[in-house]
Image (spheres, rainbow, N blue to C red):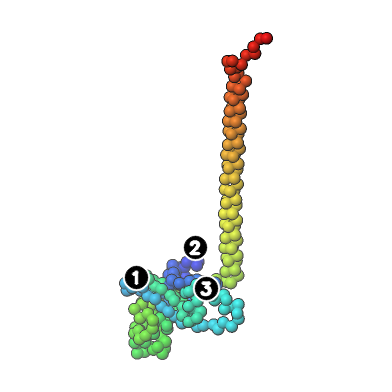
Amino acid sequence: MNQSHYDSNGRPLVPPAERPFVPYVEQETVQETVWFNPTEKDAVLDLYVGTKPVYSPKMKEELKRLPPAQLRELRTGLRRYIIRAGERRSIPSEFDQGIQQTHCQESDCASRPMYCRDMSHHHLVVGGLGPQLINEKVQHRPTVHPSLIEAYALEQEAQKQAMLLLQQNQARDAAMVAAQAQLERAAKLRAEMAANAEKDHAAATPAAQQTPAQPGHEKKGK
């Protein structure tokens, strides 16, 4: 059983919400909230993650080569998550307040009403980017050690290089086969041309040797 597909209780993990791009290195979060979109329209959530100033000329040049979605996140600090209509998707629980701001309706709640996370309590949605979504549960996704991420990246790069080398070898072999076939066709053509030339020469030589003397050219006697 692949533990990355199950939570700590052995239940299948709900897949993460769609992202317009994948960061360079992103470990899976420990705690995620499962959101269900019961509507017939996709939910697009622009959640604030913050911005990082760019000072060096090198970084400014690298920014010009980024895809538009990633460049938008770096400039605005807004990370876009998409939950398709009728689907369940997980988003890191740190964004819960941005997705839905709720107020606990239980009078005996020990927590502050705005910060109550007891799933057995009745909550009233009073704000957030996804008031139409349904907060179903929290799931715990196993974290990935950085060394494993690096090893996986190295393995992927090695496989990519091996595939590229294989494609280059296949292209080289195909070019060699094509060149060899062309050489064979050229040799065959030269042989045919030489044979035809010999036939033409053999056919022309006897005709020249057996040409009869023309009348009126015999020598007269003295």
Q: Secondary structure at mark 2?
A: loop
Query: Mark 1: few, some, or many residues within 10 Å (few <14, many ≥20)?
Result: some
| Residue at (40, 88) in percent of width and height | 114
- Determine which residue is flagged by label 3: 66
> 92 or 202: nearer the eye?
202
Query: Mark 3: few, some, or many residues within 10 Å (few <14, many ≥20)?
Result: few
The quarter of the displayed image where residue 34 is located: bottom left
- Determine which residue is flagged by label 2: 1
Q: Residue furthest left?
A: 40
User: In the image, what residue type sits under mark 1?
Assistant: Gly
Mark-to-mark CA distance, 1 and 2: 28 Å
> 130 or 215: nearer the eye?
215
| Residue at (50, 66) in percent of width and height | 3
Among numbered discs 1 and 2, the one appearing first in the sequence = 2
Q: Residue furthest front?
A: 222
User: In the image, what residue type sits under mark 3?
Assistant: Leu
Among numbered discs 2 and 3, the one appearing first in the sequence = 2
The quarter of the displayed image where residue 203 is located: top right
Q: Secondary structure at mark 1?
A: loop
Q: Horizontally, is 130 left or right of 153 in the view? A: left
**Tag nearer the camera, 2 or 3:** 3
Q: Position of residue 182 (x, y in %)?
A: 58, 42
User: In the image, what residue type sits under mark 2?
Assistant: Met
